[in-house]
Image (cartoon, rainbow, N blue to C red):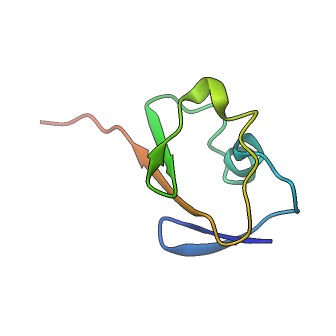
């Protein structure tokens, strides 16, 4: 299935959870990440449970430090 991640198309297996997407993107171990699916923020504790659907819109935001 295809989902859009930060404006780019990403291919996933049908029935994949949000956690699988994060693993595919090598972001599963990073901290300071916020994710919204179809404009709804998803708490990290729900990443394993939330199953993505065809054409879902995913926005991933990483916190950055700087000055």
44 or 40: which is nearer to us? 40
* Residue furthest top as drawn: 45
Task: Tell me the residue at 31%/39% (across/down).
Answer: 64
- Where is residue 39, by image quadrant? bottom left
What residue is rendered at 82% in x and 52% in y?
A: 16
Residue 28, quarter of picture? top right
| Count of labels in the image | 0
Q: Is 40 left, or right, of 21 in this rendering?
A: left
- The residue that appears at 72% across and 54% down in the rendered structure is 52
Q: Nearer the viewer, residue 23 or 14?
A: 14
Q: Give the vertical position of 10 relative to 21 (above or below).
A: below
Q: Point out the residue furthest to the right here.
A: 14
Q: Quadrant of residue 66?
A: top left
Q: Which quarter shows the C terminus?
A: top left
Q: Quadrant of the N terminus?
A: bottom right
Relative to 11, 29 lies left or right: left
Residue 24 appears at what percent x and percent y? 75, 53
Position of residue 37 measured from the top left corner of the image (x, y, whole percent): 54, 52
- x%, y% of residue 25? 67, 53
32 vs 26: above or below: above
- Please indicate whether residue 24 sits to the left or right of residue 41 in the image: right
The percent coordinates of residue 31 (x first, y second) are 50, 28
Please state if 30 lies on the left or on the right of 2 as rendered. left
């Amino acid at each position: 299935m295809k989902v859009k991640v930060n404006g780019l198309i990403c291919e996933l297996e049908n029935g994949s959870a949000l956690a699988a997407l994060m693993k595919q993107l090598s972001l599963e171990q990073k901290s300071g990440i916020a994710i919204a699916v179809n404009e709804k923020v998803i708490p990290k504790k729900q990443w394993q449970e939330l199953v993505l659907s065809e054409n879902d819109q995913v926005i991933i935001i990483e916190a950055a430090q700087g000055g």
